[in-house]
Amino acid sequence: MSYPTLPASQRAWTFSTWGLPREILSLNENYTVPPPPARADLLIRVSHVSLNPGCYVTMAKIPPLVRRLVSGNTTYVPEGEFAGVVHLAGPAVPGHLQPGARVFGCLPVPKLISGAGPLAEYFVIPSESVALVPPSMSWPEASGLAGGGQTAINMLLEARLREGTRVLVNGGSGGVGTMVVQLAKAQGAYVVATCSGASGELMKSLGADELVDYRANDPLPAYLAKTYGAQPFEYIFDTIGTQALFVHCPPYLTPDGKLVNVGNFEGPGIAIWRAMLNTYLPRIFGGVPRRYVFASTTPNGDKAAGLARMVEEGRLRVVVDEVFEFEDALKAYDRMLARNAKGKIIVKVQDV
Ligand SMILES: NC(=O)c1ccc[n+]([C@@H]2O[C@H](COP(=O)([O-])OP(=O)(O)OC[C@H]3O[C@@H](n4cnc5c(N)ncnc54)[C@H](OP(=O)(O)O)[C@@H]3O)[C@@H](O)[C@H]2O)c1
């Protein structure tokens, strides 16, 4: 039996300090290829990568010293969500994930921080973090399924949705929002989604029952209080982290209701500080009398496989905003920083 060989070096986008992508990322034509994987790890030949705003935020906010302490390295490759082919498998990898398998997945958070991401021709990921690509999916679509999808699953695990449960999805047209809208609809919820006017058609095609144009109805909390005060929401799923949405929510969120947030565009420090305040500040000191949860992404292969099944059953799709060539990764980050993508921004790494 012949085993796939590894090239001596690879192309990878790398950084070694902190800042915005255009300031710190460069295309390294001669980057080290990881060694053959140990235990249950996979060495992946990456086809496509889906960008996640959390990665550029942490690129800008996590000091290099912290990354160095976590990983022991001084050069880092960004991102976490990918689709590609298993090139080499460690000795404890299960049979269905052997070399040649088409897989997608998302790095666990500690590995995201350590900076051994997939914006490179080859990278390593634990086999428990991946699932097989559904046959009906293109590579770009598959690369965008795991991160937003599993984040959406975790958000919905904080709720008990029934037929007709009224929910608001803030940021319905983004990578996470498009998933939350579809998964909430699949559980029977009545979904109101915020988006800009240009995203309206997309949101309707994903099943949203009502739309709120957040630009035309600024300030949003006052509009929601006026429009939904008589029929408040039971859950608000916030993918943007709009603090005012929680601070002013009592008129449009039922007393038993809950706001579940994942948005942290301003960085982990502010997100943690707000989560503490929103969760624990007593009412007598101005705390909001509603429940608040900051949900996190805990990706694993079983959840990814569940999403793949939904795709195969025609109940879920990945919305691709645009696919960029590998050399144009900085343009992909520009697109992301514009904050108006419709679904996922994808970088093609190579033909696999
Ligand atoms: N993607 C992941 O896997 C993942 C995982 C964990 C956590 N998160 C966190 O979740 C958050 C969202 O990520 P994402 O990938 O969904 O972001 P994204 O796709 O980059 O978000 C872009 C979307 O945000 C919408 N938007 C911008 N400002 C808005 C506002 N004020 N109100 C409502 N919508 C607004 C835009 O809608 P219009 O174009 O319609 O204006 C656009 O569709 C980030 O903080 C990220 O770090 C993401």
Image (cartoon, grey):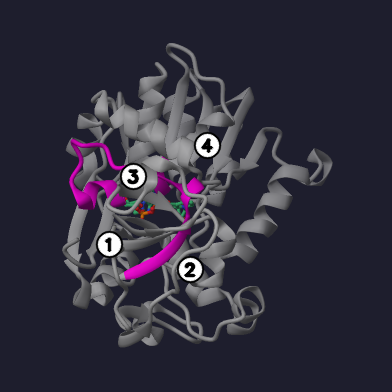
Q: For the point 43% across and 43% down, which residue is it?
A: 220
Residue 85 location, x and y as percent?
28, 55
On screen, residue 190 versus residue 280, left or right, reads: left
In the rendered structure, the answer to whether residue 58 lies left or right of residue 186 reads right
Residue type highlighted by circle 1: Ser
Specify the amino acid type for callout 4: Met
Q: Looking at the rendering, in which quadrant would you find the N terminus? A: bottom left
- Which is more foreground, mark 1 or mark 3? 1
- Left or right: where does residue 23 sit relative to residue 58? left
Residue count near mark 2 (Cα–Cα under 10 Å), binned few <14, some 14–19, many ≥20: many
In the drawing, what numbered circle is on residue 155?
Answer: 4
Instruction: Classify the position of the C terminus by image quarter.
Output: bottom left
**Which sits in the foreground, 257 or 296?**
296
Q: Please state which amino acid type lies under the numbered disc 2.
A: Val
Whether tag 4 and tag 3 are in contact, CB under 8 A, the answer is no
Res. 27 image quadrant? bottom left
The span shown in magenta is 122-149
* Residue identified by numbered label 1: 2
List x then y, in percent, for residue 269. Answer: 64, 65
Q: Which mark is residue 65?
A: none
Q: Position of residue 177 (x, y in %)?
A: 38, 42
Spatial separation of the CA atoms under disc 2 and disc 3: 20 Å
Asked if the residue at tag 4 contacts the one at tag 2, i.e. Cβ–Cβ closer than 8 Å, the answer is: no
Mark 1 or 2, which is nearer the eye? 1
- Which residue position holds label 3? 145
Q: Is residue 169 above or below residue 32?
A: above
Instruction: State how far apart marks 1 and 4 are (Cα).
Output: 44 Å
Question: Can I make out residue 152 in this image?
Answer: no
> Label 4, label 3: how many angstroms apart (C-alpha)?
15 Å
